[in-house]
Amino acid sequence: MADGGELNPTVDFLAGTLAGTAGLIAGFPFDTVKVRLQTPELAGHYRGSITRAIATIVNEERVFGLYKGITSPLLTFALMNGLVFASYKFFLRLQCPLIADASLTQITLAGMGSGVISAIITTPTELIKIRQQQWTGTSTARGVAAGIFKAGGFTGLYRGSLSTALRDCGYGAYFASYEATVRTLTAPGGKREGWPVLVAGAVAGIVGWLVTFPLDVVKTRVQGSGPGALLSPGTAPIIGGAETPVVNPYCTTWSTIVHSYRAEGLLVFYRGLAPTLIRAVPVNMVTFGVFEIIVNAFG
């Protein structure tokens, strides 16, 4: 983060919020591709390269299709990113009053703590976003949220909260890899700016996703299915010559892991990884670049 200086938490929050907004806009098209590749009912339609998947979406839904579902995260993700950075610094200060002296272990623990806190906002936001991205038709964030609330009440908006919190613990690896890289590329006591920050941001994005991607696949499947829904006709096992309704296998985090592995093998947990890693590079270069610029301006 910024030069080890002790800044006002408000500055951390503001810098994280603006950085999150910039990063979201830069990488959202790749996120749309990732979600569709991870959704069992849609994955077959987008087989092939990432560019082919993007071309298919643009051809069928125009450029706006790549930004479908951005309203919900744009309204909340920026604030969530601010919360992540601010809470990360908070947990870091609890362990080490002088941030510049924090060890990578302390940084990892602080990052994990910020991830759990962020899940409070991330869960309903990503639930709405995923439901929108799954549809090839037109839908609004407000309409999707209303439908979820009508079907499952307030708790319905927190479907997938466990898998989201577990995934977001990956912020530990995210911040640790950023710090390790930027400390290596920056002279001791030097200002964090320019290419070292951009490289460190790219490394953080890649490492963060490599660590958390399997749980992201699980989270997408849990949130992309309705609680207690029945499988579509033809997918239920035949018992005594009659088709028997089966409870949705994506009801819980554990059932999703087990069913996905049995049905599609280990590689299913890395489906959509390529566009995610490609997206992670520019997104996190922009995110940390903007964050450090703002922090340096106030520092």
Image (cartoon, grey):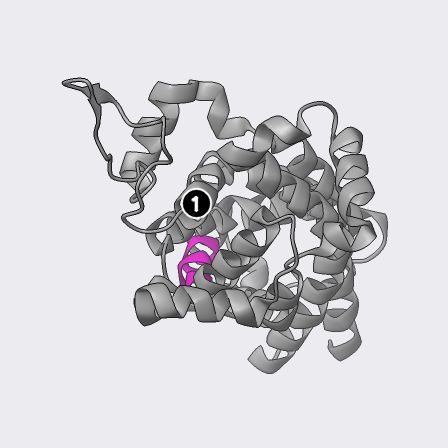
Asked whether, in this view, residue 50 is left or right of residue 114, the answer is right
Q: Relative to 256, say whether 110 is above or below.
A: below
Q: Magenta span: helix, strand or loop, mainly?
A: helix
Q: Which residue in the protein does label 1 denote?
A: 219
- Please tell me which residue lies in front, 284 or 61: 61
Residue located 29% across and 44% down the image: 252
Instruction: Rate crowding at label 1 as few (under 14), some (14 to 19) or many (20 or more) other CA atoms within 10 Å.
Output: many
The image quadrant that residue 157 belongs to is bottom left
Residue 91 visible in the picture: no
Q: Residue 117 is drawn in which quadrant? A: bottom left
User: Measured along the vertical axis of the image, is residue 100 above or below residue 87?
Assistant: above
User: Of all residues shown, which one is farthest toward the front?
Assistant: 241
Say what amino acid the circle numbered 1 marks. Lys
Q: Position of residue 141 (x, y in %)?
A: 58, 67
Quarter placement of the N terminus:
bottom right
Q: Is residue 123 magenta?
A: no
Is residue 186 rendered to the left or right of residue 233?
A: right
Write down the region rendered in magenta. Answer: 110-119
Q: From the viewer's perspective, tell me whether residue 215 is left or right of residue 194.
A: left
Quarter the C terminus occupies? bottom right
**Which residue occupies 74% across, 25% down?**
49
Furthest-left residue in this view = 240
Residue at x 14%, y 18% (from the top left corner):
240
Residue 40 appears in the rendering: yes
283 w.r.t. 118: above or below: above
Q: Secondary structure at mark 1?
A: helix
Residue occupying the far right of the picture: 194
